Amino acid sequence: MKTIPLDDARQMPLWRRPRTLLFLMAAAMPVAFATWSALLNNFVIEVAQFDGSDIGWLHTVREIPGFLAIGVIALIIFIREQVLGLVSLAMLGVATAVTAWFPSLGGILTITLLSSIGFHYYETVNQSLQLQWLPKAEAPRVLGRLLATGSAATLVAYGLIMLLWDPLGLTYNIVYMLSGGFTALVAIYALIAFPQFEAPNPQNKKMILRKRYWLYYLLQFMAGARRQIFVVFAGFMMVERFGFDVHEVTGLFLINLVANMLIAPQMGRAVARFGEARVLRFEYIGLVTVFSLYGGIYYFGWGVLLASALYVIDNLLFGLALALKTYFQKIADPGDIAPTAAVAFTINHIAAVFLPAGLGYLWLISPGAVFVLAACMAAGSLILSLLMPRHPEPGHETIFARPLPAAAE
């Protein structure tokens, strides 16, 4: 397959440029993954009679490939990042398509593991390509638009589920087959239609751990731990405590998507204007508040309207995490982006491997305590973000480091 230097790709037709490929992948991935997520809680409760412990184990299995994302470093020695990303995207699509064929605890765990390998390896490579292909000055705005694009694509899928689930008597199998099949076909098309793009800075093909990235590593760890509580238990709460049906869960997701489409581009502009440090502090203050109120639902018996509003606000705040990507882009050596993306994904998923299963047992005793723990984690992230400078750059990664060129470590 033809290889094109990134600078020369600007002369190509719009539909074959690198940025177009990023937007195409941003639209394709959520169709499979978000549809899987939207149906998951109802599917496992209705078909396999999952309880809180089972759902915790499922998400622990789902996060194992994220913990092993460091394997991307070994794979890119033999496979180009662009190819690896698209093959992983196709794997996610195929595994999603056959999810309903395995309606048992063992079957669901197995197919979830396979789809998760595709998802996490795709996300690792995709983050690396975004930071390599997008200029630093444009990255926050474009990342916001990519987030909005994914929301728009998912909006179409969710809208169809919500409108057609009851009238057409849709089944889990039909929806999983259509959504997963779409994602797989788009990945195959992208493999064929786009040339291989060559970034100007060759990537290190070995594990990179640098002392000066320590704040980035810690924020990634905290984000992964905190995110798991939202992903695993917030949606599960809506089904278990408030009895949401498929179309009601999907309707809540639709509100999230519309909000993301409208606000995500503004998030990118906010990062460009106010800087990563201020935006991340705003995010973490918001998350402390949201998780504390989640806990109040159980401790004080607050109702479904508050829970639904918190779910939407929670989702929007997590979108501000794009500031963590651009923070790393500004402090990184250009050749460190690919290996550090893999290392960061592994760090992000350290807690994800044990937290869902462990907190699944805590959930059986006190669901409110799970959300209080998440609020404490968000507070920890807020404290760490206070160490981030207004204008990060190599050698000035934290407020303690002077803005001098960083020596190789």
Image (cartoon, grey):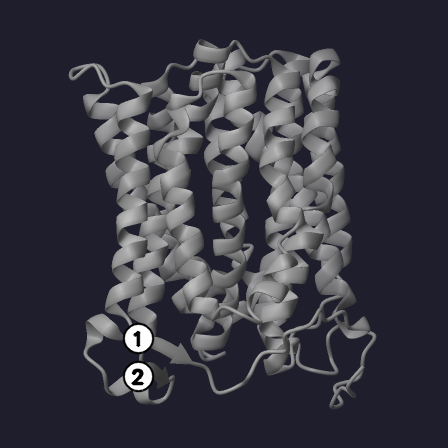
Q: Is 294 or 40 nearer to us in this picture?
A: 40
On residue 195, the disc is 1
Q: Are marks 1 and 2 in contact (CB under 8 Å)?
A: yes
Give the residue type that dot 1 points to: Pro
Q: Is 307 or 245 nearer to us in this picture?
A: 245
Which residue is at 62% across, 65% downward?
Answer: 73
Expressed as whole percent of the image width and height from the top left, the position of residue 381 reads 72, 51
Q: Disc 1 or 2, which lies upstream in sequence?
A: 2
Which residue is at 19% across, 79% downward?
Answer: 13
Horizontally, residue 233 falls left or right of residue 244, namely right
Q: Is 372 or 54 nearer to us in this picture?
A: 54
Which residue is at 31% across, 80% downward?
Answer: 2
**Can residue 391 be seen here?**
no
Expressed as whole percent of the image width and height from the top left, the position of residue 130 reads 46, 68
Can you identify the residue that label 2 sits on? 9
Give the residue type that dot 2 points to: Ala
Nearer the observer: mark 1 or 2; the answer is 1
Which residue is at 35% across, 57% downward?
Answer: 25
Query: Could you classify mark 2 by the number of other residues whose Cα lies within 10 Å: few (under 14), some (14-19), or many (20 or more)?
Result: some
Choose top left, top right, bottom left or bottom right for residue 7. bottom left
